[in-house]
Image (cartoon, rainbow, N blue to C red):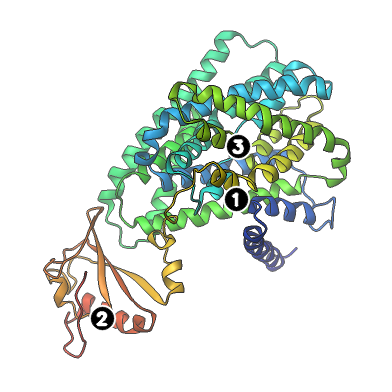
Amino acid sequence: MSPGEKALVAGILLASAVVASRLANRLSVPALLLFLAIGMVIGSDAIGWVNFSDYGLAKTFGIFALALILFDGGLRAGWPEIRPVVGISVSLAVIGTIVSAAITGIVAAPLLGISTLEGLLLGAVLSPTDGAAVFALLRGSRLKHSVERALEGESGFNDPIAVLLVILLIEAITNAHNSAGDIALTVFNEIGFGIAFGVLIGIAAVAILKRLHLDSSGLYPVATIAFAAISFGAADALGGSGFLAIYLTGLIIGGKPIPARRTVEAFHDGLAWLAQVALFMTLGLLVFPSHFDSVALEGTAIALVLALVARPVATAIACLPFRLPWREVVLIGWAGLRGAVPVVLATFVVVGHVPDAQNVFDIVFFAVVVSTLLQGATVKPLAKRLGLTKDEPPPVASLRSTAALERMGARVLQFSVKQGDAIVGERIRDLGLPRETLVNLIVRDGSALPPRGSTVVEAGDELRVMMREESEDEVAAVFTRWRTGLVADTSATRTHPL
């Protein structure tokens, strides 16, 4: 195809994903399943629009996509939100993942007629909850706050554990010469370097971002994605867990006041959605629906074992030291959604030349679809039945995005004050803003400052100006005066901030 034809195909696929997300809300099913379905439909085993079977490329792409999704999850949560539930989250990520993998593997081995080691590998592949699926579930949810955060923390922390289990089991199956010392060193490197680089680069990123004073707010997302890449790459290059590192870096940056925070969050939210859409479509391309007849029974059985036995038992054991109410344990056990992570891990099995790897991939895919359909559609009703939904409405989207404001006919514009601007040294009340327009926030040195009429504008400030939609052109003219000319315009009717 020509470049133009490729762009057209990409545009059509992205548009179909947007439509699919709206349809998923109406059908009460996870949108990510519809993204998978799109990939399956356009793949070589259906209409044959795209012929793709490169598991190695899919593995590489999956790793980068999951890294972007994890960084966004950490950025939106922030360390202060995760800290109160970090013990539960880590316990679920470590103990829960290992126990879930063990139970699933022990059941899968005789069911599929494979060795115990191969069964444990299948269990390890299916053991992690999926960050993309969990984060999508929690967007706008009304689950109890502590349950939300525990699930979110678990989905960020358990990927490194699952990856480590899969790598060790693949090596045990294909190379039986690894000693206990080799295994211990691998575990130490993965966890140790992952934590070290995640924390150090996160702290350094916050300090640097506060001192950069970039000319455009659009450059701050570029800086944050650079820090994310450095965190993941440095840890991975030294044998550590890049997933753990990038999630911790996101948590640290997300928990601190940084310049252009709304721009950064909006950018990474969009990037994470793009990564999810592209990842699930790519994984859908690898699936051959004609293979489902041979794995449907086994895949369904394993999905039921995972959802009804392995995950609940693992959750109960992991939560035991924290004395959680039984209702919360039940909900956490049921809300451990599967998604892209197990399917990406299944590509590790194929690339690692494990015996009968293609069959394992097909079983994993089918089990993930069944598990996600079963659990994803019932988590919120179960939470309501257990009394674990919040009485108050979910956080308003407009606190992080201007989309909700725009639907109500409002706009929020940002003005970055530079040294030498006419606005420097002026009081807020003297800025000459039109009627029904106000400065509702000042970001100064990375901190939010609620403005008063007497507040004096300083170089380096970022002013957030809220207005009616019809005032946008008039405010743009005011911004020009703030930069180069007289600040006040006697013809304008001024208003004052809150």
Residue nearer the viewer, 286 or 464:
464
Q: Tell me how far mark 2 sits from mark 3, CA to CA.
A: 54 Å
Mark 3 surroundings: few (<14), some (14-19) or many (≥20) residues within 10 A: many
Q: Left or right: 368 with respect to 481?
A: right
Q: Tell me how far mark 1 sits from mark 3, CA to CA.
A: 22 Å
Task: Please name the amino acid that badge 2 sits on.
Answer: Val
Q: Quadrant of the N terminus?
A: bottom right
Q: Are marks 2 and 3 in contact (CB under 8 Å)?
A: no
In the rendered structure, which disc, 2 or 3, sits on the residue that comes first in sequence? 3
Q: Is residue 488 above or below residue 118?
A: below
Q: Left or right: 425 with respect to 351?
A: left
Checking the image for residue 276, the label placed there is 1
- Percent position of residue 337, x then y: 61, 40
Q: Residue at x 21, y 71 (%)?
A: 497
Q: Is residue 285 above or below residue 301?
A: below
Disc 3 marks which residue?
334
Disc 2 marks which residue?
478
Residue nearer the viewer, 469 or 423:
469
Q: Are marks 1 and 3 in contact (CB under 8 Å)?
A: no
- Percent position of residue 258, x then y: 31, 51
Task: Please name the amino acid that badge 3 sits on.
Answer: Trp
Q: Is residue 345 above or below residue 24?
A: above
Task: Please name the amino acid that badge 1 sits on.
Answer: Gln
Residue 239 in view (yes/no)? no
Q: Residue at x 52, y 15 (%)?
A: 185
User: Quick one: SS at disc 3?
Assistant: helix
In the rendered structure, which disc, 1 or 3, sits on the residue that comes first in sequence? 1
